[in-house]
């Protein structure tokens, strides 16, 4: 399946040993790798805000980076599960990445096992992808940058909901399946309690995620809050939903 057709966050290349790929396990076992990604992102974010490279809170940068990384870890597996009902055999040990300055990290897999058919795709996805892949990476963010688990798991939930939204935008035919899978995964540990989908128009299948935490991006000058942020005023949120439903 060509997952890249759904957008860059879904792309997953086949791993080849003669190419410059780095093991995802680095994000779990080597704090220096994560620190380098935070430093790179900090330079970019500070430059956009017209600030010195060291002017931003490292915790804010780390939270922002985690949100993007979690999206890359969740989105390919999510799209494949929505499309086939089977969870791909991905794990930390068979995922690879390449560094870039900005944008989604290129990722590849060396997995050779077939996807696993599931009688309960949400439970298997929560176990194998969220707990199996995201959780160990998330733990490094929490340890290295003293970030709240509530913030980090909220970021993971936001990334999952974002994957459902992007997938539905790329292929409207899967809107209901993507939304249902995302909601089911959010009803299971470790994402249970991080937020929920709301449907302002029951006649339409599209839901909008509202998280119970904040990614801290608002602490970057002119950063503002995200549409799913707990800090976004209700009136602003509902206006955004109306605009999205009528666009």
Image (tube, rainbow, N blue to C red):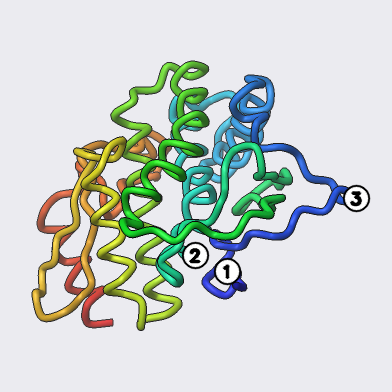
* Secondary element at tag 3: loop
The N terminus: image quadrant: bottom right
Which residue: 68% across, 54% down? Answer: 112
Q: Nearer the viewer, residue 31 or 108?
A: 108
The spot of residue 83 in percent (x, y) is 44, 72
* Secondary element at tag 2: helix
Mark positioned earlier in the residue sequence (2 or 1): 1
Mark positioned earlier in the residue sequence (3 or 2): 3
Q: CA distance from mark 3 to mark 1?
A: 23 Å
The spot of residue 65 in percent (x, y) is 52, 38
Residue under pointer 3: 18
Residue under pointer 1: 3
Q: CA distance from mark 2 to mark 1?
A: 7 Å
**Above or below for 152 versus 5:** above
- Quick check: marks 2 and 1 in contact, CB under 8 Å? yes
Q: Residues within 10 Å of mark 3 (few under 14, many from 20)?
A: few
Residue found at the very far right of the displayed protein: 18
Residue 36 horizontal side relative to residue 17, left or right: left
Residue under pointer 2: 80
Q: Residues within 10 Å of mark 1 (few under 14, many from 20)?
A: some
């Amino acid at each position: 399946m060509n997952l890249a057709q759904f957008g860059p966050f879904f792309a997953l290349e086949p791993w080849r040993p003669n190419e410059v790929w780095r093991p995802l396990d680095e994000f779990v076992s080597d704090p220096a790798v994560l620190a380098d990604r935070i430093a790179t992102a900090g330079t970019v974010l500070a430059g956009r805000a017209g600030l010195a490279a060291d002017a931003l809170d490292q915790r804010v940068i780390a939270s922002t980076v985690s949100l993007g990384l979690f999206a890359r870890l969740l989105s390919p597996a999510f799209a494949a599960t929505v499309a086939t009902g089977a969870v791909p055999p991905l794990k930390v040990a068979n995922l690879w990445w390449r560094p870039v300055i900005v944008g989604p990290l290129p990722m590849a897999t060396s997995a050779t096992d077939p996807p696993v058919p599931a009688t309960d795709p949400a439970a298997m996805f929560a176990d194998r992808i969220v707990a199996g892949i995201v959780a160990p990476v998330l733990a490094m963010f929490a340890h290295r940058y003293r970030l709240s688990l509530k913030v980090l798991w909220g970021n993971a939930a936001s990334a999952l909901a974002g994957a459902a939204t992007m997938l539905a935008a790329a292929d409207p035919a899967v809107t209901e399946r993507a939304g249902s899978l995302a909601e089911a995964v959010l009803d299971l540990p470790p994402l249970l309690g991080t937020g929920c989908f709301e449907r302002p128009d029951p006649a339409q299948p599209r839901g909008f995620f509202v998280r119970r935490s904040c990614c801290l991006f608002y602490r970057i000058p002119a950063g503002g809050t995200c549409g799913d942020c707990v800090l976004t005023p209700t009136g602003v949120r509902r206006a955004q939903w109306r605009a999205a439903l009528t666009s």
